[in-house]
Image (tube, rainbow, N blue to C red):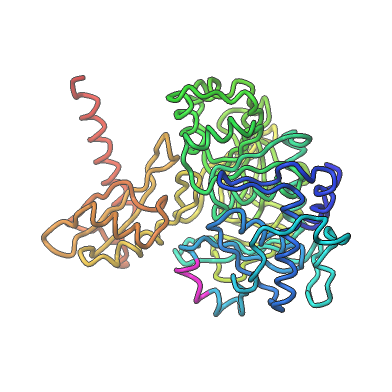
Amino acid sequence: MREGLGDTVCASLEAYAVHAGGGTALCDGRAALTWREFLARTQAAEAALARACAGRLLRVDAGDPLSALVRLCAGARSGRIVLVADPAHWQRYGERLHTELGPVAEDEAFSGCDPAPCGPDERGDDATGPVAGNPAARFRAGPLEPFYIGLTSGSTGMPKAFQRSHRSWTLSFRLCLEAFGIGGSDRVFVPGGIGHSLHLFGAMLALDSGLRLDIARRFQPKAILRRMEEAGSSVLVATPTQLQLLAKGAASEGIRLPALRRILLSGAKWQDRERDLLARMCPGAEVHEFYGTSETSFISHRRAGDPPGSVGRPFQGVEVEIRGEDGTCLAPGETGDIWVRSQLLFDGYVMGAEPMTRRDGSWVSVGDRGALDAEGCLWLSGRKGRMIVTSGMNVFAEEIEAALLQYPGVAQAAVFGLEDPLRGARIVAVIQPSGSALPDPQALRRHCLALLEPAKVPRAFQFLSHWPLTPGGKSDLPAIAAEIEHREAARDSVSRRAPA
């Protein structure tokens, strides 16, 4: 294990402020903080929470990464439970979160903590003393205490909130450092905001481990490449879609990243055909693909020699079973539900529910299906429900359908994910118009953008005048999907026959 890591999130900031105080801890492209400055700001935020007598549940807006990460660390160190939400999520679900979770402390609780703090000499000898020990801060951080609440959408399209403990995070950090050989003088780059769970994990991994973190406010490939080049970033935490776009951007700009040696990928399948572009961008880098979920954290990762197409073998300390519908363990090669047991599992849902998620004692299944081969490698075959994985994001069709049905010209809607080499899946919406005129696709797209995150907006719209129904009166999704696949196949056939 890496020395200095604590049992609670960000417990070692004082040590990093002493040993690497003048070195950069965090940079977002506009501003940077040294470890001493980051600790001072975190302590100022802890003090502000104590003065405000803020309750235990704390919301952190993910919009400004520097402020958000300072506040998240302050919340963690003062024993609070931090709800990280991007502005769009909070605008849509804030009222329900307040209703179901109880009082949520917001930005006012941090009043006065954001201006640049004075230097250590001006603050006195106790500048690195823990504010969390103040009796006014009535809570205590502990390994098994809850630390983080994340938001995601359930298979019904309704939001759900899941809770994780300090231990589930700190053990995940240690597994990551050991499995992927990260540490020492590594510099971590996270190419997007912490509203995305993978980006949040990468950012907190760096700060909790005493590694320099560079983070992008938004994904802009060329700007990110230049920043990685300037910072000498050696570790990249990204989705396969982001990596592919970065590699293409590097090729067009002639940018090389010789310092990059570790790439951590999750969220979708990395396409092997893009490896030549990647090798030109960073010839010395190793790609580490891992599989996990918000509820389980790490499950497995591919090592050298593991068969292509698999998601590798379980991490150390993670047990995986494949079970049939009757709950019995299946033999190698047989496909069933994936069940996981480890110390990394989430505490449970604190708002909403996911019908695909089940518990059996210390085991959890989130509805993913797959098989273990005779060598212990895990193969994913699909997911129950209608989840679509696009651009590294888990998207549920029902949420998009509900948004489409709010448009005046839409009578029925069904959403599917079609295979796409860039995004993993391309979201296609099928619509039955409510009148004789077809809705304008651009107007539909603008409508969706007003209600959904950009990655959830359909890339194409198809129209059906006759809407297939099951005998029970519900949309016949297999029949609709078959029609769309027939259209796509016909379109591809015409494209292949078209003269160059």
Residue at image point 61% right, 58% down: 68
Q: In the figure, 476 relative to 176: above or below?
A: below
Start-end of magenta stretch: 90-96
Of the pair 372 and 283, the residue shown nearer to us: 283
With 257 as the anchor, is 449 left or right in this view?
left
On the image, the x and y values in percent for residue 281 come to: 54, 24
Q: Is residue 309 left or right of residue 416?
A: right
Would you say residue 370 is visible in this rendering?
A: yes
User: The N terminus lies in which quarter of the figure?
Assistant: top right
Q: Is residue 87 magenta?
A: no
Q: Main secondary structure of the magenta part?
A: helix
Q: Residue furthest front?
A: 122
**Whether residue 133 is situated above or below residue 364 in the rendered picture:** below
Residue 485's image quarter? top left
Say above or below: 323 vs 211.
below
Answer left or right for 18 relative to 57.
Answer: right
Identified at 36% across, 50% down, the residue is 416
Nearest to the observer: residue 144 or residue 354: 144
Q: Nearer the viewer, residue 462 or 169?
A: 169
Any part of residue 202 in sight = no
Residue at x 62%, y 23% (from the top left corner): 258
The answer to which quarter of the image holds residue 100 is: bottom right
Q: Magenta includes 93?
A: yes
Q: Position of residue 256 (x, y in %)?
A: 55, 23
Residue sitting at x 29%, y 56%: 446
Quarter that holds the C terminus:
top left
Res 488 → quadrant: top left
Q: Give percent across and percent down for residue 94.
A: 51, 72
